[in-house]
Image (spheres, grey):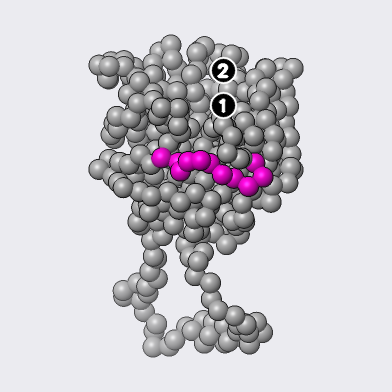
Amino acid sequence: MGHLIKYGQGTKGQHAFSGYFPLMESRVPQGTAFNGRLPFTLFFVPLLLLFTALSNPVTGQVDYSRAGQPADQSDAQTTSQSTYASVNPAPLHIKGDFKHFELDKLGNLFLISQGGSKIIQYDLKGDSINHYDNISSYGAISELDVANPLKIAVYYRDYATIVVLDRFLSPVNTIDLRNAGIWEAQTIATSYDNQYWVYDKHEAKIKKINGQGKVTFASNDLRQVFDDGVDPIRLIDRDGWLYAYDPGYGWYIFDYYGALNQRIPAKGLKDIHVTDGVLTARIDKAGQPYLWIMDADPRKLGAVPLEKPLLINGIMDRTSIEVRQSMYLGRTGELLLLTDKGFVREPMSIR
C-alpha cells in the first residue's frame, strides 16, 4: 500500500481503509398487518417531530464531517468494543515522564509513570481526574487493560496477580493466578464476557479466569498445535476474536473456543493494537519509528513511515527524541504518541 502520511495537519476521519461506517436500513417486516387501521404512532410521531422542529429551528448548515462517529460519551458506550470515542478532536499535549499509555473506548487516557507504579487518568480535555498508586504491595505494573472502563485490569507479572479497579481507579478485586495453578502468566487481557484471558507460559495454554480466580476455559497445548511453538507477549480481545502476538512469528487470531482462524507473519512489532478490524503497531528500522498498519485482510498489508522530523507544538522540536509508544486511530484519523518529552494526540491522515 503506497500510503502518504501527513502529520500534524490531517483531516479528521480520513483513513486508509473503506467500510468503516456501514449504513443501517430500517424496514417494516413483510406480512405486518394493520387490521385496516393505521397505528396511532403514525399520526403521533410526525406531530412530535414537527413540534420539535418548530421549537428548535435550524440556524446553520448541517456538519457531515463527523458522520459515523459517536456524538457524545453515551453514544460511544453503545459502539463496538474496539471503537474509541473522540468527541474532542483538538490536539492534546501532556508533558511528563511516562512509560506507557492506554485509551479506553470512552476516550479516557491512562498514563503510567516512568517508575511503573502510578496510573493517572485524564479526561477528554486533558485534565487529571483520578490516580492509582500501589507500589508498596506489588511494585511496577506489567500490563494495563482498559477494555472495560468499569473494570480496569492492572497486571503484576512478578506476583502473577491481577488487581481490578473501578472507574475511579479504586481497587475492587484481586485475583492471584497462583491459586489457579498459573505461576508464569506472560500476558493477560479482559475478555468479552468480563473474565480474563491469560497465557500460561509454563503449560503453553491460553486460559480464561473468572473474577473468583477459577479457570473456566483452557486451550490445547500450543506447542503440540504449532510445530514452531507459540510464545505470545500480548493478548487482545476484539470484535469476536482473540488476537495473540508473538514477536518471533507474528499474529495468531483465534476464536473464543481456541480454534485458529489465521496466522499473519510479522516479526518484531511493538505497541500492538487492534481498532475497528485493523491491526496497528510500530516497527523500528535503522533507528527510525515506522507506523505498521494491516487490514484484517492480509492482502492489504502496508508499512508506513512516520514523517520525519516529528514536529509537535509545545512538546517536540527538531532535537532527537525517544519514541516510547504509538497508537493510530483510523476511525478518527488521530495519532497518539508517547515520547521522553510527554504524550501528544494529533491529527494524522493516511492516503
Q: In this view, does 48 lie above or below 218?
A: below
Q: Nearer the viewer, residue 68 or 267?
A: 267
* Amino acid type shown at disc 2: Arg
Decide whether residue 316 is among the magenta residues.
Answer: no
Magenta residue span? 305-315
The quadrant the C terminus occupies is bottom left
Q: Is residue 307 above or below residue 218?
A: below
Q: Which of 31 and 333 is in front in this view?
A: 333
Q: How crowded is mark 1: few (under 14 residues within 10 Å), some or many (20 or more)?
A: many
Mark 2 lies on residue: 157
Which residue is most to the front?
Answer: 318
Q: Residue 229 vs residue 202: left or right?
A: left
Q: Which residue is drawn at 51% across and 64% down?
A: 66
Q: Can residue 310 be seen in this view?
A: yes
* Amino acid type shown at disc 1: Glu
Mark 1 lies on residue: 143
- The span from disc 1 to disc 2 (Cα, nearest Å) is 8 Å
Q: Which residue is drawn at 41% across and 51% down?
A: 350
Q: In this view, does 276 lie above or below 59?
A: above
Q: Percent position (x, y) of residue 294?
A: 35, 41
Q: Residue at x 72, y 20 (%)?
A: 135
Q: Residue 221 vs residue 150: left or right?
A: left
Tag 1 near tag 2, CB within 8 Å: yes
Q: Residue at x 49, y 70 (%)?
A: 64
Q: Percent position (x, y) of residue 116?
A: 65, 23
Q: What element carries label 2?
A: helix
